[in-house]
Image (spheres, rainbow, N blue to C red):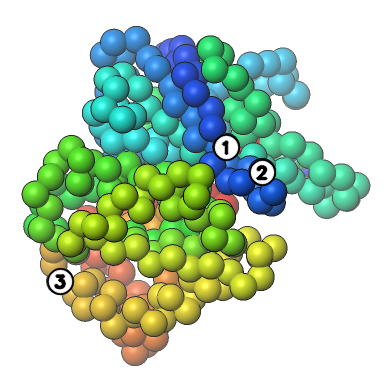
Amino acid sequence: MNVNDFDISHPMEAVLVSSERITPPDADAEVRHLVFQLPEGAFPYEEGQSVGVLVPGPHEFGSRHYMRLYSIASPRRGESGAPDSFSLCVRRCFFIDEISGERYPGKASHYLCDARPGARVQITGPYGLAFAPPSDPSANVLMVGVGTGIAPFRAFVKHIYDEQGGWTGKVRLFYGARTGTELLYMNDMRKDLSLYYTQDTFKAFEALSPRPHFDAPPALDRVLAKNSREIWDMIRDPKTYVYLAGSRLAAEKFDRAMIAASGTDQAWFRTRYDLVAQGRYAELLYD
Ligand SMILES: Cc1cc2nc3c(=O)[nH]c(=O)nc-3n(C[C@H](O)[C@H](O)[C@H](O)COP(=O)(O)OP(=O)(O)OC[C@H]3O[C@@H](n4cnc5c(N)ncnc54)[C@H](O)[C@@H]3O)c2cc1C
């Protein structure tokens, strides 16, 4: 789906309450956790949904709007339980022009990362994208992602344990990062997800790249391969729901691990087709 396909006709104003860098100052990547406040009852959302952020103009080529999507990182009852609030996890992006070799700042990510508390940001949505956690507390949840793909999973885990409670299904997170400090929400800067390590049903598998400058952590291959038997057994359980978020390369790595576990390309792609048909497989991939 193209960003132009989203309805942006009813934007609303969200006030930025806080903006916190969640990668250390010396880490290559700047990722920020931003918390927004909205008017009462104006923006009900659920985990897995995204918001559109409208960057103020003027814009090039005469376009009236410049919109980018960001996954909501909070569970449905709000950031830290504060009603009508939500958070985003935004990576400051740069792009290299292939012809001039120059480095350009990404518009929306810079706009958000530069915004200071009190800023008023036009947002649209929330948009569903068929990326929702199961409501049955005995369901198993398998999450695979890298980088800012952690945002919807932070919302899932907080909803499952803080809001819903009594979860008996297995909750498994396979998360890749380039370095330990870039393990978002599981590093020294913020420990949101590490807080759940004491839950009997929750297990997180961290995959750190031995080559910090690679975008898609090769370690994710190894962690997925090492645990492929458990993953494959989980997938064959009709109570398991599979989610992939972040880089497309993470999805390719997952496919490779599952091809190895299932025996053939055909066996895995057939299984994946069935999972999609049963509403038990969803992807939110964007770079
Ligand atoms: C459903 C969804 C959820 C998302 N969730 C998140 C999230 O939680 N966190 C997050 O950080 N991001 C998320 N993203 C990505 C986000 O929407 C933006 O794509 C990202 O922040 C970059 O946008 P930008 O405006 O900063 O960059 P842009 O300015 O839009 O640049 C984006 C693209 O334009 C090209 N480009 C731009 N300028 C140049 C240039 N001068 N020369 C050559 N090429 C150029 C690049 O190839 C690049 O791919 C999500 C995307 C989707 C679709």
Residue indicated by mark 2? 25
Vertical comparison of 250 with 49: above or below:
below
Judge the density around disc 1: few (<14), some (14-19), many (≥20) Cα neighbours within 10 Å. some
Please give the count of numbered marks on the rendered protein.
3
Label 2 residue near ligand 1, CB within 8 Å: no
Q: Residue at x 49, y 63 (%)?
A: 176
Secondary element at image label 3:
loop
Picture coordinates of residue 135 (x, y %)?
A: 14, 46
The quadrant in which residue 260 appears is: bottom left
Q: Are marks 2 and 1 in contact (CB under 8 Å)?
A: yes
At label 2, which amino acid type do we have?
A: Pro
Residue wearing tag 3: 237
Q: Along the line of sight, which residue is nearer the eye, 111 or 26?
A: 26
Report helix, strand or loop for mark 1. Answer: strand
What label does residue 21 carry, if any? Answer: 1
Mark 2: few, some, or many residues within 10 Å (few <14, many ≥20)?
few
Q: Earlier in the sequence, mark 2 or mark 3?
A: 2
Residue 224 x, y percent position in the rendering: 41, 75
Q: CA distance from mark 2 to mark 3?
A: 43 Å
The amino acid type, in three-letter code, at marker 1 is Arg
- Between 181 and 53, the one lying in front of the other is 181
The circle drawn on residue 154 is: none
Q: Closer to the observer: label 2 or label 3? A: 2
Mark 3 belongs to which amino acid? Asp
